Amino acid sequence: MHNSNSVVAEQFDDRIQQHEASNLGMWIFLATEIMFFGGLFTGYTIYRNLYTSGFETASHLLNAKLGAFNTAVLICSSLTMALAVHAAQTGKRKKLIAYLLSTMSLGLVFIYIKFILEWHHDYLEGLAPGLHFTYAGPHARHVELFFCFYFVMTGVHALHMIVGEGVLAVLLVMAWRGRFSTEKYNPIEMMGLYWHFVDIVWIFLFPLLYLLGARF
Amino acid sequence: MSEHIAPKRLYFFVFGSLLVLTLLTWRIAYIDLGPWNTVVALAIAVLKAGLVATFFMHLRWSGSMMRIIVCAAIFWLAIMITLTLGDILTRNVVSPSQGWQAPAAVVQTTAPSIQQH
């Protein structure tokens, strides 16, 4: 008999099939996300190839140290997310709550650094195309284009982080109410896949945006 | 198999490797290697992404269906980037504004052969 508290949903034969189905669905969603970010990466590659020195000049204006620090923050949050999945798999409710909270906090640290220490600073420096762009050094137009890419790519990435924070908050409440067990933790695992994917996107954004001009 | 519980120390090992690779790619970026800077940075990024996908995202213990999805996603991305760059990078070979013109060297060598006919 199936009811709302059943571990296996009505449409599935057993837990393994249910688990496979949710994993498959999540990975297909992530495949579409790869194409979504892939378009931006392709555009970036084309213009970087066309305006190499402009992009290198612009990249040099970014704070590579903050970028590296934020990479480390995201990697830490990926670890806590992986440990949250582990805690869910082994049925440790308190640890699950603690790891979900740490993941959320590290995500917020990342967003704080991104918005307040970086974007706000870039805006004040006159590096925000369309809003406040006063850079008049060499390759000014190409620098502006780089910053268009920078704000759109990091912006879309930050949007994914904010969505992730929202879903984490829902999962936190569910974990608090004891909705998960060693038999039923699929949402936590899917959240893990999403969060690690967002981490992977940043792993590519960091060298392409921040490290490109670091050596000049 | 798909619900394999990975040992915690594996996660910590992957985490340590990711931090070391981040430090490495950051420090290398300050050394001038010419075009190799980009190659090294991307190689390290691919390695880091591979570590995250394999262990944190449990691909190591996932079924072949999930691996096919991942391979397909990467393959489609490769199609987009390769075909787009194939177009963009070869556009200046023939300048569209001037139309096609035979290079001077070709004109000189082929002109006498036309006269012979």
Image (spheres, coloured by chain):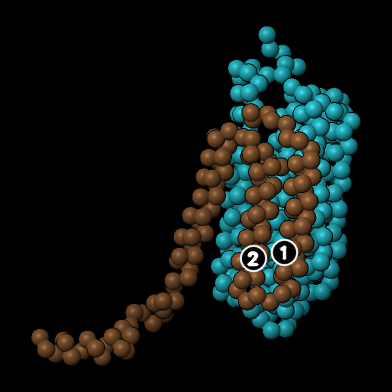
Q: Position of residue B93 (x, y in %)?
A: 41, 76
Quadrant location, the N terminus of chain A: top right
What is the residue that sits farthest to the top in this orientation? Answer: A1
- In the image, residue A29 above or below residue A64: above
Q: Is residue A96 visible?
A: yes
Q: Are marks 1 and 2 in contact (CB under 8 Å)?
A: yes
Q: Residue at x 57, y 61 (%)?
A: A42
Tell me the distance, in whole angstroms, between the alpha carbons under discs 1 and 2: 8 Å
Residue B83 position, x and y percent, is 46, 60
Q: Earlier in the sequence, mark 1 or mark 2?
A: 1
Residue B107 locus on image (x, y percent): 26, 88
Q: Quadrant of the C terminus of chain A?
A: bottom right
Indicate left or right for B44 with B91 as reference: right
Q: In the rendered image, what is the letter of the chain coloured cyan?
A: A
Of residues B52 and A61, the one drawn nearer to the viewer in this rendering: B52
Above or below for A183 versus A198? above
Q: Colour of chain B?
A: brown
- Subunit under mark 1: B
Q: Specify few, some or many for label 2: CA neighbours under 10 Å numbering under 14, 14-19, or 20 or more.
A: some
Residue B25 tag number:
1
Q: Which kind of residue does numbered mark 2 sit on?
A: Val
Front in this rendered view, residue B25 or B101: B25
Name the residue: 55% across, 35% down: B64
Is residue B92 depicted above or below A41 in this figure?
below
Residue A165, visible in the rendered structure: no
Please give the chain letter of the residue carrying mark 2. Answer: B
Q: Which residue is mark 2?
A: B40
- Per the image, label 2 sits on a secondary structure element best described as helix
Residue A102 x/y as whole percent: 87, 43
Label 1's element? helix
